[in-house]
């Protein structure tokens, strides 16, 4: 029979505090521990497996998802836990697709785009430049792709150099079959990077982060499977 463990014993393996282990139990991440006659917690190999799984899930799926998964397993809702993980995997795929779009945009930015307008363009001039209808530009605005300013006198939309750049990217990606929501995500990435030059230098970092998260998901899946197996074996032994 495996000797019961104290909070400090579980904590030592992962370099965390014993209080963190107790907090995880309080939050439902670990199953409730039995107590000695004097009130001390007694953890088992099941708790150790649960802690390994949770700490692996955090870098793979985030703290909130990891907690939801562990609480669902603790409540006996394994299907609910797996569904939560499915959603996280789907989000990573969407993130990868967004990055693909950003890389496509970066390649275009590195090529011979039309020279930027020296003065802000009204909607008619920009629509003519792109060969689209003004209604299309307004639709892109509603989708969060464009954010033009308004002329103080006329209150008409005017598009500065950054707006024209975003419109050029949107036009390219739309021709490539990307949905508007996807294009909006790409444009946000371009803006957050501070422009095309800064964007080019961050693409590899984004790709590496996605790959690291995917690898973490593989590790977490194995440890979660170990935990589920421990739970199932314990339940059989108690029947």
Image (spheres, rainbow, N blue to C red):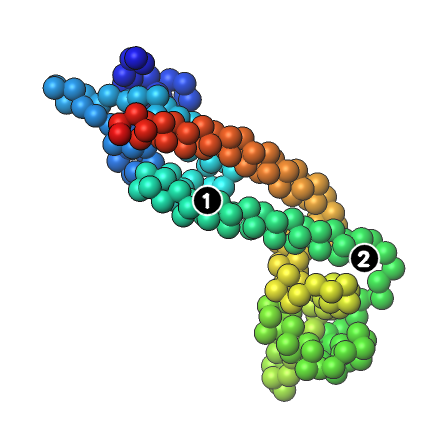
Verify CB contact (< 8 Å) between mark 2 and mark 1: no
Foreground: disc 2 or disc 1: 1
Dot label at residue 186: none
Q: Is residue 178 left or right of residue 5?
A: right
Q: Position of residue 106 (x, y in %)?
A: 76, 53
Residue 9: image quadrant is top left
Q: Position of residue 114 (x, y in %)?
A: 85, 66
Q: Is residue 19 above or below residue 153?
A: above
The residue at 52%/38% (across/down) is: 60
Q: Which residue is tagged 1?
A: 82
The residue at 72%/74% (across/down) is: 120
Q: Nearer the viewer, residue 31 or 94?
A: 31
Q: Which residue is tagged 2?
A: 108
Residue 17 appears anywhere in the view: no
The tag earlier along the polypeptide, 2 or 1, is: 1
User: Separation of disc 2 and disc 1 at Cα?
Assistant: 39 Å
Quarter of the image for the N terminus: give it. Answer: top left
Which residue is the extreme one toward the left? 37
Q: Position of residue 166 (x, y in %)?
A: 71, 65
Residue 163 appears anywhere in the view: yes
């Amino acid at each position: 029979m495996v000797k019961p463990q104290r909070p400090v014993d579980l904590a030592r393996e992962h370099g965390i505090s014993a209080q963190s282990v107790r907090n995880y139990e309080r939050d439902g991440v670990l199953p409730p521990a039995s107590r000695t006659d004097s009130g001390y917690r007694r953890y088992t190999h099941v708790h150790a497996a649960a802690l390994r799984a949770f700490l692996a899930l955090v870098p793979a799926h985030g703290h909130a998802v990891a907690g939801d998964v562990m609480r669902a397993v603790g409540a006996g809702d394994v299907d609910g836990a797996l569904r939560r993980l499915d959603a996280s995997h789907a989000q990573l795929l969407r993130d990868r697709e967004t990055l693909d779009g950003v890389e496509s945009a970066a390649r275009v930015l590195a090529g011979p785009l039309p020279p930027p307008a020296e003065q802000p363009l009204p909607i008619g001039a920009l629509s003519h430049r792109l060969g689209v209808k003004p209604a299309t530009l307004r639709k892109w605005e509603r989708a969060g792709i464009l954010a033009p300013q308004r002329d103080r006198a006329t209150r008409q939309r005017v598009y500065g150099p950054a707006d024209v750049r975003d419109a050029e990217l949107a036009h390219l990606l739309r021709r490539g079959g990307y949905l508007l929501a996807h294009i909006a995500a790409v444009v946000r990435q371009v803006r957050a990077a501070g422009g095309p030059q800064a964007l080019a230098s961050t693409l590899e970092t984004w790709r590496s982060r996605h790959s690291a998260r995917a690898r973490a998901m593989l590790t977490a899946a194995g440890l979660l499977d170990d935990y589920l197996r421990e739970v199932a074996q314990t339940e059989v032994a108690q029947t």
